[in-house]
Amino acid sequence: MIDKTTSLENALRTIRDGDTIMVGGFGVPGTPFALIDGLLELGVSNLTLIKNEANEDGMGLSKLIEANRAQKLITSHLGLNATVIGMMNRHEIEVAFYPQGILAEKIRAGGAGLLGILTDIGIDTILAKDKAVVTVDRQPAMVEPALRADVALIHAAVADRFGNLIYEKSARNFNPLMATAAAKVIVEAEKLVECGDLAPDQIHTPGAFTDHIVVLDTLTEEYGILAHHVL
Amino acid sequence: MSFKEKIAQRAAAEIGAGQIINLGIGIPTLIPKYLEDHKQVVVHSENGILGMGLPCKLGTEDRNLIDAGGTYVTAGRGAAFFDSALSFTLVRGGRLDIAFIGALEVSAAGDLANWIIPGQYSPGIGGGMELAQKARRLIVTSMHTTRNGDPKILKACTLPLTAKGCVNTIITELAVIDVQPAGLVLREIAAETEIDTVIARTDAALLIPDGNLTRY
């Protein structure tokens, strides 16, 4: 049976300067912190990063941006990260904002082999500036090109050796979409099981999309509860 | 009760039995404690939850279960989890009955500006545009004026828009105002205020119905 498990170093070793990298997660849940740390250690730069947000100051994706490894960030909201907003305002990083669900659809389209989507979200706003507009059913619609990446970094709760994946609760978010939309899909998994151990009906991402699986021996503090969000 | 709590309590009364709602950051997050159990309201969260329960009690937090603002929450009975594309399929596809949202400015025509003050505040769009444009009903919950006392309800917005003509109702600590084709209609006023105060603190014209207004 196919076995895609490998070491973190081996999974990341083909990533190059200038690559476009999708990173799963919405806040802490679903963010692949170990793969991000591995990327930081690899030392690659001039990256284009795609993630819903940039995590909070000093955590996850923010560490890569704070270390000046990214020239561009494609995202939805940075409200919980004043450091990256400051870097954006000082033009130390280019930031492209999209409505959250449109960002998701651009990635979904990229994964599905479509060239883009047509949408009216933001059509009466500054978001429509410089966008191609077509007419569909006598309504104006903006053309939003699909997004693909060189690499997707994914966090799963459970993987089998073939790369069938299950996500947990609100940690699913962008992970299954990004797992379809990159030339190479690298998954960190909290738990590894044998092929056949997962019920086929329960699988969120089928193994065809997974290239490498890195099994997490332990979860670092970053995966835990954030004290300042506890009521 | 603080003004913000009062706004949240009044906003909760707008929700019908069994409705699907989304709660934006700020005042809307105070609404759940005023939901009556028998109404069986279903809360959607942008990060992929339908049927979200109350925030976690201290010590019961689950690292994989937060709302879109990062607060640790619970899953209610009958809850479902899904990815970010499906989460906004629910919104854009017309399955969201009410979205409650904050505002920097609202215009007489129901235009909303709440996501950017160029040069000062630019955290990004998040889910706001889709919620504003596609929720079946959009209710703005906000203080009536800015911290400086300037009106937020204007003849026309000055900031970049979130969406045009999207607001149905505005609930503040002073008044409940509906956006109608004829203009802004005063529906209720707060117990401790007067119509003249509401008019003075609103830049846009208000249509005042005949007879006594309901107090809240």
Image (spheres, helix red, strand yellow):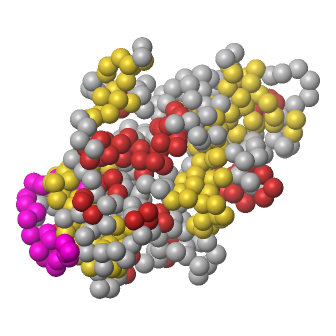
Image height of B32 relative to B157, above or below: below
Q: Is residue B142 left or right of residue A92?
A: right
Residue A21 included in the magenta stretch of the image:
yes
Q: Going by the picture, which residue comes out furthest to the right? A: B211
- Our reading of the magenta stretch's main secondary structure is loop
Residue A159 pos. (x, y %): 32, 72
Q: Does the magenta stretch include residue A4?
A: yes
Q: Quadrant of residue B194?
A: top right
Q: In which quadrant will I find the N terminus of chain A?
A: bottom left
Residue A79 in sight from this viewpoint: no
Q: Residue B121's spot in the image, x, y percent? A: 41, 45
- Residue stretch in magenta: A1-22
What residue sits 59% from the left and 82% below the top? B59
Judge from the rendering whether residue A27 lies leftward or rightward of residue B51; answer left or right.
left
Of all residues, the one furthest to the bottom in this rendering is: A217
Q: What residue do we see at 87% from left, 31% from top? A: B213
A32 vs B174, left or right, is left
The C terminus of chain A: image quadrant: bottom right
Is residue A151 positioned above or below B102 on the image?
below
Q: Where is residue B30 in the image (x, y as percent from the top left)?
A: 67, 56
Residue at image point 60% right, 26% down: B110
